[in-house]
Image (cartoon, rainbow, N blue to C red):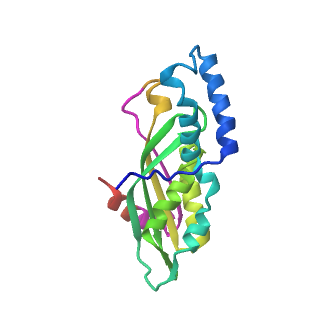
Amino acid sequence: MAYNKNESYDEKITSGLVENYKECLHLLGEDPEREGLQKTPERVAKAMQFLTQGYQQDAREILEGAKFTEAYSEMVIVKDIELYSMCEHHMLPFFGKAHVAYIPNGYITGLSKIARVVDVYARRLQVQERLTHQILDAIQETLQPQGVAVVIEAQHLCMMMRGVQKQNSLTTTSAFSGQFEHGTTRAEFLKLIAK
């Protein structure tokens, strides 16, 4: 069976980005017509559309699409969710893991939807602090649970391959609402996500 690559990109956006990336290559001193670079502007244009596809997605709609009535009222944790995002300051990647928990208050959602919510907000030009709160807010507003907790641990290439060049740095952000604002519930969550 032959491999069938199925990708679709907005032609107008792609062509505009291609022209801009050709100009970038030229301004950097490269020849965009050189054999190895001839398709690079198109590849980068498509990659950037993929890496920022979260702008065209709605996290609340994703959660609502798998919102179920359930009497369960204990902590639900989805941990070690891989995330890949782009720093809005340097347009370089940052990547790591998100740990997300909520305590249902009559409604649960499909577990994969939690990971999808992470992707919706990660696939944008982003800062880790905002990303953490956007994930929390979407879950809190849609499911209206007793509380939400989000912890993100990520490495930022803008700190690793330029600037201060600290290869072993790890940035951790957290956001808590409802029951997770209380010490015992927060402590239980943090213990359960510890390595």
Residue at (41% x, 76% y) in the render: 74
Whether residue 175 is visible to the viewer of this picture, yes or no, is: no
Q: Is residue 172 above or below residue 143?
A: above
* Range shown magenta: 166-186
Counting from the top left corner in percent of width and height, residue 100 is at 45, 61
Q: Is residue 140 above or below residue 11?
A: below
| Near-viewer residue (86 or 11) | 11
Counting from the top left corner in percent of width and height, residue 121 is at 56, 53
Residue at (44% x, 80% y) in the render: 73
| Near-viewer residue (162 or 31) | 31
Q: Is residue 68 above or below residue 103?
A: below
**Left or right position of 29 against 189:** right
Considering the image in quadrants, where does the N terminus appear? bottom left
Whether residue 187 is visible to the viewer of this picture, yes or no, is: yes
Q: Is residue 21 above or below residue 95?
A: above
Give yes or no for residue 177 being in the magenta stretch.
yes
| Near-viewer residue (31 or 181) | 31
Give yes or no for residue 181 being in the magenta stretch.
yes
Counting from the top left corner in percent of width and height, residue 28 is at 59, 17
| Near-viewer residue (53 or 113) | 53
Counting from the top left corner in percent of width and height, residue 66 is at 52, 75
Direction top: furthest residue: 29
**Left or right position of 143 against 193:** right
Residue at (58% x, 46% y) in the render: 52
Direction front: furthest residue: 1
**Number of marks in the rendered image:** 0
